[in-house]
Image (tube, helix red, strand yellow):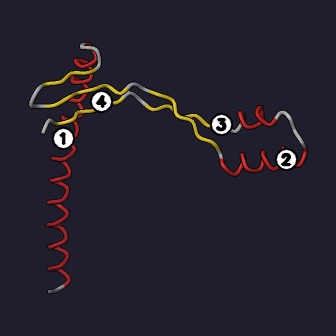
Amino acid sequence: MTDDTQIQLIQSIISEYYEIQSELDALEYMQGELRQRLTVSTKALGGRVQIQGLATVSLIPSSESHSYDTKLIDALLADAVADGDIHTAQRITHARKSSLRKESLRIMRDK
């Protein structure tokens, strides 16, 4: 196969790829719109709806998660042990990291 033929083949594949990507983007947008409508309707009905034989839709509320910097905690504890520091709990509190999780919609298909 010549280089020109290979290039034409690649151009054809890329064109097809972009066409499919465009269709996927449109479908994902439509899916997002449907999820938003489901969220509003599910929220109006108390956050959980079961449609027998079809699906259960639930709103998972937003939440805050916490994690700690392990290296920092280890260093603080080593310092506390060495120094006999009674304020270790205060220092550990400052090492706390928080992140918020957005509310999410769970759709579980009935089997």
| Disc number lying in front (3 or 1) | 3
Mark on residue 26?
Answer: 1
User: Which residue is denoted by mark 4 in the rendering?
Assistant: 105
How many C-alpha atoms fall within 10 Å of the one at disc 2: few (<14), some, or many (≥20)?
few
Q: Can you say whether 12 is above or below 72 in the image?
A: below
> What x and y, as percent, mark residue 29?
22, 36
Q: CA distance from mark 3 to mark 1?
A: 41 Å
Disc ID at residue 96: 3
Secondary element at image label 2:
helix
Q: Earlier in the sequence, mark 4 or mark 2?
A: 2
Asked if the residues shown at circle 3 and circle 4 are in contact, with their CB atoms under 8 angstroms apart, the answer is: no
Of marks 4 and 1, the one in the foreground: 4
Quadrant occupied by the C terminus = top left
Q: Are marks 3 and 2 in contact (CB under 8 Å)?
A: no
Q: Earlier in the sequence, mark 4 or mark 1?
A: 1
Q: CA distance from mark 2 to mark 1?
A: 59 Å
Q: What percent of the width, then of the height, locates residue 23? A: 15, 47
Q: Residues within 10 Å of mark 3 (few under 14, many from 20)?
A: few
The residue carrying mark 2 is 81
Q: CA distance from mark 3 to mark 2?
A: 20 Å
